[in-house]
């Protein structure tokens, strides 16, 4: 397998990014994504909104042959995506994300995004709220936020010229521990394969706006 990294045309064409996106099941295994570029994609994904900016998403990037061999058996019927893609990103939620509260608001002050007094008020309000939130409620909030970041990651990848596929079929109860992560703290959301398609993804039907929308 070639180790030459392939660069693809980036685009800012929003229609191309959204309407051109397909779920790709088979990738060109010769295509690699540098960790520098993957870092850019993850940074762009991390611009997604989250409840009180708590950013509960965490990423596991599997881009080595060894990592893919470990992941493939856990991916059930999605092993083609794992083994042929340039990388698979495991999206997790951090159930202890409240630990970053003071850093998030402190850095907001440091960068001039928020006055000190407002930051202190926010921390005073948010900290007890997160500390006392039932685990099930925190999980629900974090899953919504991580879902936003996951979609943004796929759109960012498309803007970089890559294809993706969100994967829900895998051994969710095993994946964290398989990669040395605390499975109580880091809970899986989805896997996202990234690379360049070897077989074009199929277009799919979308319900019309009239069917899915109620106006009030």
Image (tube, rainbow, N blue to C red):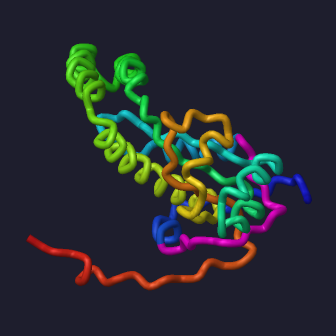
Describe residue 195's horizontal placement relative to residue 131 as left or right.
right
Residue 28 is inside the magenta segment? yes
x, y percent for residue 98:
38, 26
x, y percent for residue 72:
73, 58
Identify which residue is drawn at 51% across, 44% down.
92
Q: Is residue 162 above or below residue 101?
A: below
* Residue range highlighted in magenta: 19-35
Q: Is residue 71 above or below residue 8?
A: above
Taking the view exactly as shown, the residue that stands out farthest to the left is 216
Predominant SS of the magenta segment: loop
Q: Is residue 211 above or below residue 168?
A: below
x, y percent for residue 58:
52, 39
Residue 4 appears in the picture as rendered: yes
x, y percent for residue 97:
42, 30
- The quarter in which the N terminus is drawn is bottom right
Identify which residue is drawn at 60% across, 42% down.
176
């Amino acid at each position: 397998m070639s180790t030459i990294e392939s660069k693809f045309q980036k685009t800012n064409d929003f229609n191309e990014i959204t309407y051109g996106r397909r779920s790709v099941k088979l990738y060109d295994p010769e295509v690699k994504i540098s960790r520098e570029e993957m870092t850019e994609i993850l940074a762009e994904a991390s611009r997604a909104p989250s409840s009180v900016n708590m950013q509960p998403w965490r990423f596991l990037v599997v881009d080595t042959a060894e990592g893919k061999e470990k992941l493939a058996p856990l991916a059930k019927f999605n092993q083609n995506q794992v083994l042929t893609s340039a990388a698979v990103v495991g999206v997790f939620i951090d159930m202890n994300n409240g630990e970053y509260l003071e850093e998030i608001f402190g850095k907001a002050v440091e960068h001039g995004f928020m006055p000190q007094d407002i930051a202190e008020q926010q921390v005073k309000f948010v900290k007890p709220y997160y500390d006392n939130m039932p685990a099930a409620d925190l999980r629900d909030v974090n899953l919504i936020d991580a879902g936003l970041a996951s979609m943004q990651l796929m759109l960012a990848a498309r803007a970089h010229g890559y294809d993706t596929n969100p994967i829900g079929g895998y051994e969710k109860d095993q994946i964290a521990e398989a990669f040395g992560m605390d499975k109580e703290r880091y809970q899986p959301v989805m896997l996202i394969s990234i690379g360049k398609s070897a077989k074009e993804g199929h277009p799919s039907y979308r319900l019309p706006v009239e069917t899915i929308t109620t106006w009030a």
